Amino acid sequence: MNNRTGVYALETIRLNKQFGGLPATQDVSIRVRPGERRLLLGPNGAGKTTLFNLITGESLPNSGQIKLFGKDITRLAGHQRAHLGMSRTYQIITLFPRDTLQHNVALALLGLRRSRWDIFRSMSDDLMIEARRVLNLVGLDHLAGQPISQIPYGEKRRVEIAMALAQKPKVLLLDEPLAGLSSAERTTIKSLIAGIPRETSVIMIEHDMDTALDLAETITLLHYGKVIVDGSRDDVVADARAREVYLGH
Amino acid sequence: MKRICMLSALVAAMFATAPLFMGNFYLNLGSQMMIAAVFALSFNVLVGYAGLTSLGHAAFLGLAAYLSAWLTTRAGFGHGAAALLSIAGTTIVAGLFGLVALRASGLGFLMITLALSQVLWGLAYRWVSVTNGDNGMTRLTRPMPFDVSIESAASFYWFALIVTLVAFILITIFVRSAFGASLQGTRDQGRRMSALGFNVWMIRWIAFIYAGFWGGVAGLLYVYYNKYIHPSSLSITTSAEGILGVIAGGSGTLIGPIIGAALITFLKNFVSSYLDRWNMLLGFVFLIIVVVMPDGIVSGVRWLNARIRELCK
């Protein structure tokens, strides 16, 4: 924990994003410590994915600031943020369907290597071996040679996570990693997420409370684009506003 | 795999020895097929591997051809220097065009590339003092690479064959490289690639320039072959024929563009001597390809091959 020097793994300062006249996030300020497990909660349309898109640089805020380990990254392009240690998964599966699992993970590895500019040599063997190792980590080694289009949905979810983990990110954003999974598959993914090394800060959007609350240390609750409650898991769960807006019991 | 190797060796031997037993008409047809093939190969880098459909690729073919013609006839350059300068100039222009066109993707990209190529086409028509306008530039010569004349149909055929082979090999290496994998990634999932650390814009720009470079090489072959250059080489028709070749053969496949380009050249040159309305036949052939093999001839043949094997089991 680097709290002593006041350096957060990720910090957003009064982030605002509007789509037309519609505010999607309003003055969102969150601070995530290195290694923290943060859960982002909120009803549909609360601005959770918009916040993810702002953090990863897929869209730019109208105002506000984003800092990664104290460095202002507000105006950096998405790919530059990846090189600073940021990685994400998508709520809607975003893989390369024609390519094999191994190729998908290898692309994730290639993204951070200089050899991605090499126009003469194909992806190196050590890249492929490393991709196999990562697939093994998520238990998909045996499907390495299959095209993504041929594997079931639950396995695709695991590839999503494998691609993010392959990059050994410092800040990992998981957008509904359990969406659409059976309970058996949920258990698998849950233990995968629980096993993410402590060097990595994890910010997760998830609606499955049983699982999400188990994994989270801190919770930020968004409602209509605003932070309603922000604090440790137990505080937020006990909070009256949180119960009213989201938890509902 | 072994069978494929043997087959390609056979095909290569057939192509290499064609001048020994074929008449000039067919050799010239072969040369034109190869020029169209290099053009389609370069186009395929954009359409097939970058997923960027352009309607202005003829700009690079025509520009290189005009540059070479102007440099050798008006500026007094030798063929060697003129070839280098033409390709360099075309590549630079591709870089500039890319800066403009890649501000958009999809339909916007298509329209910008079309507009840019139309600008060059208009220049070729109107800047008569330089380009000789609608009369075109005539009395051009062919180079003598390594002091070897390529005047005869056979020698030009071999020359074009070597250039085509080099283009095919280098483009194959390019699309199979790590960069090629990145490029195909940006075609399939641009957002994801960006999140993974790839500079999607830069990757597309480099691919655009690379395609422009080979388009320029096709342009040199074109002007050497015809010894004449007319604004129509820069027209949308030239781009359209190129893209039809890519799509007919199979975009995003390695040999598809060659097959498609050969087919179009064949229809255009051979069938047109028997049929007045050869354009109608061309349209009909395309209709059949699109209906029966929507992913192009290469994919269609692969599918057919798989089905036959299944039936023979």
Image (spheres, grey):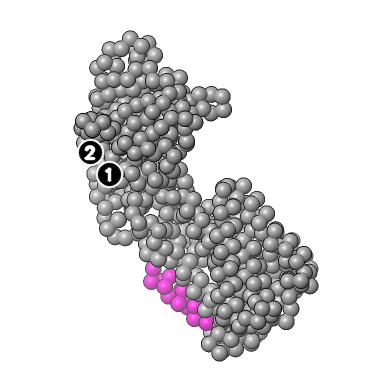
Q: Which residue is mark 1?
A: A168
Label 1 SS: loop
Q: Image check: B65 left or right of B2?
A: right
Verify CB contact (< 8 Å) between mark 2 and mark 1.
yes
- In the image, B3 versus B153, the foreground residue is B153
Quarter of the view holding residue B178: bottom left
Assess whether residue A248 is covered by the magenta stretch.
no
Quadrant of the rendered structure where residue B160 is? Answer: bottom right
Q: Residue at x 40, y 58 (%)?
A: A117
Question: Is residue B4 a member of the stretch shown in magenta?
Answer: yes
Mark nearer the N terminus (2 vs 1):
1
**Which residue reaches farthest front?**
A5
- Determine which quarter of the picture holds residue B124: bottom right
Vertical position of residue A224 compared to residue A157: above or below: above
Task: Inspect this view and state whether residue B270 appears.
Answer: no
Query: At 30% from the left edge and 22% from the top edge, which residue is drawn?
Result: A219
Q: Residue at x 57, y 79 (%)?
A: B81
- On-image quarter of the C terminus of chain B: bottom left
Q: Could you say whether the residue bearing mark 2 is in a helix, strand or loop?
A: loop
Is residue B135 among the parts visible in the rendering?
A: yes
**Residue underneath mark 2:** A199
Q: Position of residue A23 (x, y in %)?
A: 50, 24
Q: Chain of mark 2?
A: A
In the rendered image, the quadrant that contains the N terminus of chain B is bottom left
Density class for disc 2 (Cα within 10 Å; few <14, some 14-19, many ≥20) is some
The tag on residue A97 is: none
Residue A245 percent across, percent down from the top left? 39, 14
Q: Chain of mark 1?
A: A
- The range drawn in magenta is B1-16
Q: Magenta region, mostly helix, strand or loop?
A: helix
Amino acid type, mark 1: Lys
